[in-house]
Amino acid sequence: MTDHLLEITGMHKSFGGLKVIDDVSFNVRRSSRTALIGPNGAGKTTIFNLLTGVYPIDAGTVIVGGQDITDVPAQDRVTVGMSRSFQNIRLMPHLSTVENVMLGQHARARNLGSLLFPLGMLPRNDWRTAAEEALERAGVGTYPGEVVANLPYGVQKRIEVVRALVSDPKLLLLDEPAAGLNKTETLELQALLEKVSDQGVTILVVEHDMQFVRDLCDHIVVLNFGRKIFEGTPEEVHQDPAVLEAYLGTDDDSAEEAANAS
Amino acid sequence: MSGYMEAQLIILCLSIIYAYGIFLPAASGQLNLGAAGFITLGAYASAWFNASAGAALPMWLSIPIAMIFTGVIAIAISFPILRTRGVYMVLATFAFAEVVSGIVINLEFVGGASGFPVDDHADVTVIVPVTIAVILFSFYFMSTRLGLALRSIHDDESVATLFGVNVRTAKVVAFTVGAMLMSLGGSLYGHHYNYIEAQTFNVLLSIYILLYVLMGGTQTAWGPLIGAAFFAIVPETLREIAESAGLKWLAEGRFILFGVFIVLLMVFRPEGVMTRTLQNRLGGGLFRRKKVLTDDTGGGS
């Protein structure tokens, strides 16, 4: 009935007495590129953690591709077609690039035969080849004989995206993928994500780089203090008074600041 | 081969088997100080199933049965034990080994405190091939996707979970398979010396085996091999050198020198002698042709 891939309804989460997510509801259209933005501490990463099952939610439902995953344990959520990257790099430092990417394939290889397949002993096998090709498509080298801890930041950041991609997600959650990248790297990342999006993968991205968000995304959800304050197109977001207030403060504040400055 | 060399070889082989039993869980970040417990279980179970007073089965049946027996117990205790981590897991596994020892000493049908004679004899022609099989198995195990998952758990458990790894199951499997290897080592010990007593398998043994693994390195399947070989060979070699040089004080005090070695290792190789980076670097020289083909996955290719 709907073309929504992700439906979040009435999501609540408190840590102790602190309400970090307060009745948030929004949908992500299939094949869209949606951005989740907001000032620091608005709850963007918390929403990712709740979606992927790092913490249980206090109330509300999460539906992915028509399947209610509210009570699905974290390790099984990736099999419904959802994977993510992390704000601070969370690659496995002692594994090589290809091994990190092969970990991303785990969701598709959970039967006993695949688990006992000697990936490391056979130099040419389908899993390894697939991982190498995924890296190549993303313009990242395979860096043989190198653990990822020794690789440059920008490369690690992109390996994270590739690792999330090889689980074959329908919904890709990216937590600040462009943070810390320079202009060229950001453009390369954008091109990669556009390519991925053209293949039908739905993207939900948390990002502070507004240029990146405007160029990439067709839909924006704005959070502030755990509440949704705006949902709409990139064009509309700049005119919305609530968003401007969240980012820039109210007119009263700026009048006060002006008074103080003079 | 001289009797002395053969005796040394047996000790080396048993140490290697024990070390892999601790390495498999250690690769996923578990610190297991319960080696003596699993070795005791294996030694006594196999001895009893083999004894004419017991089940009177041949050795080649009693040893696998002992492994299964130990595996079942390992699964049962893994659930409470794997709820702990780090130094608390060290304490929990240590306590398990003490409990096993305490129970066995009070079991009269396996001889209690006076020890238990073992019937069938396993000589070097049994122990060496089994050791080689254990080494090959461990390399295979670490090169599988399950091995990759275990190494991922070692690095970042919550991220491994988010990529679909069933962390609990993977840890239980590593713990149990490790316990079964130690059981195998214990059985072979019993069948080689044909006499076992629970006091032999004390906490010092558990500490040594954990040290083999941590000193050798938990990142690659070479680690326990290097660690066990180092610990088994260096003190003996030191003794021989010291004796032939006429330095009696050094021959007797060789463990002081050995202790210094361990401290130096901890200072200069805190992640163990063999790390991934070192393996890759050596691989570049030693197996250069192979490297081009294989990249670098697994415990070692």
Image (cartoon, rainbow, N blue to C red):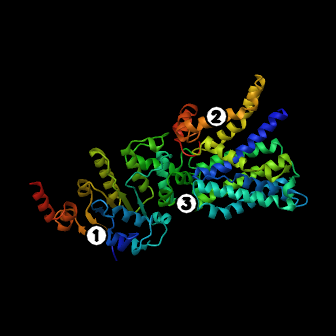
Pick the quarter of the image with the C terminus of chain A. bottom left
Q: Amino acid at mark 1?
A: Lys
Tell me if I can see residue A65 in this picture: no
Specify the farthest residue to the bottom. A1
- Label 1: element kind: strand
Percent x, y for residue B249? 75, 28
Q: Residues within 10 Å of mark 3 (few under 14, many from 20)?
A: many
Residue at x-position 82% and y-position 50%: B190
Chain holding disc 2: B
The residue labelled by disc 2 is B260
Chain holding disc 3: B
The residue labelled by disc 3 is B167
Viewer-proximal residue, B59 or B226? B226
- Label 2: element kind: helix
Q: Residues within 10 Å of mark 1 (few under 14, many from 20)?
A: many
Tell me if I can see residue A68 in this picture: yes
Q: Amino acid at mark 2?
A: Val
State which tag comes first along the sequence, 2 or 3.
3
Percent x, y for residue B242? 74, 26
Q: Residues within 10 Å of mark 2 (few under 14, many from 20)?
A: few
Q: Which mark is residue A228?
A: 1
Q: Amino acid at mark 3?
A: Val
Viewer-proximal residue, A207 or B241? B241
Drawn side of residue B70 relative to residue A223, left or right: right
Picture quadrant of residue B8: top right
- Marks 1 and 2 in Cβ contact (< 8 Å): no
- Mark 1 vs mark 3, CA separation in Å: 34 Å
Viewer-proximal residue, B251 or B277? B251
- Mark 1 vs mark 2, CA separation in Å: 62 Å
Percent x, y for residue A21? 35, 69
Residue at x-position 47% and y-position 72%: A71
